[in-house]
Image (cartoon, helix red, strand yellow):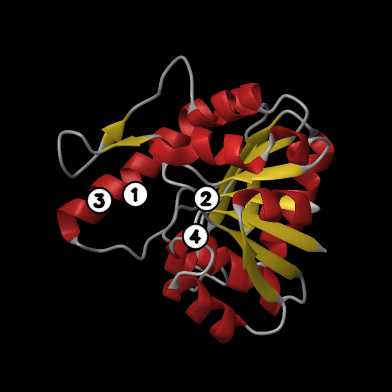
Amino acid sequence: MNVGILGSGAVGQALGKGFADLGHKVKLGSRDPGQDKIQSWITKTGSNASAGSYADAASFGELLVLSTPWAGTQNAINLSDKKNFAGKVLIDVTNPLDFSSGPPPRLAVGHTDSAGEQIQHWLPESHVVKAFNIVGNADMVNPKFPGGPPDMFICGNNDGAKKKVTEILTAFGWSTIDLGGIEGCRYIEPLAMVWISYGFRTNQWSQAFKLLRR
């Protein structure tokens, strides 16, 4: 499968390497694909990795991943050309973080709306699934915790898209909990703030969530 990743930071690079290690072809999208950090990632990741513009990555991918900082998300989508998203599954890894008051950040969107819902509104012909936003990039692929595999909460309006993302999460070592439609982002994105707030208070960034059941 061809995977296009919009965003060349640590999150995009970690997920891109995860897909490449499973044998998928990955193109990392950036405003400056020639920068050293991206070329270094290509060298480290191997022959399944490449880079291009946002539009290159969006056109290349049969499956797309959105891993941009929230402040640049809408611009990245516009630079990618919205027709390149039509009919495709888009894994939304964003969190709507506002750092204007300094760390720790606060949510810029919440309670009656969410980043995931806004992205689905901007891209009505794509199938947006929120995933991977409640854990750090170091643990996104093959997470290892003493309590066993952690849970990843997902949501989205298309059941087929969520099935595809669940298969990816399973391959990446996760158990998946489906919270329903895309409005579930109103709860998953604040859950990321639990992870973020704890991290800033303790300087401990390797933690994940698990739903315990009887």
Query: Which of marks 4 and 2 precedes in the sequence?
Result: 4
Q: What kind of residue is marked 4?
A: Asp
Q: Is residue 206 left or right of residue 44?
A: left
Q: Which residue is mark 4?
A: 32
Q: Secondary structure at mark 3?
A: helix
Q: Residues within 10 Å of mark 1 (few under 14, many from 20)?
A: many
Viewer-proximal residue among 1 and 159: 1
Distance from disc 1 to disc 3, alpha carbons, whole Å, reads: 5 Å
Q: Which residue is mark 3?
A: 198
Q: Are marks 2 and 3 in contact (CB under 8 Å)?
A: no
In this rendering, does residue 71 appear at all?
Answer: yes
**Identity of the residue drawn at 55% across and 85% down:** 44
> Can you tell which quarter of the image residue 51 is in?
bottom right
**Identity of the residue drawn at 30% across and 48% down:** 196
Q: Are marks 3 and 4 in contact (CB under 8 Å)?
A: no
Q: What kind of residue is marked 3?
A: Tyr
Residue 21 is situated, as x and y percent measured from the top left of the image, at: 68, 78
Distance from disc 2 to disc 1, alpha carbons, whole Å, reads: 17 Å
Viewport quadrant of the N terminus: bottom right
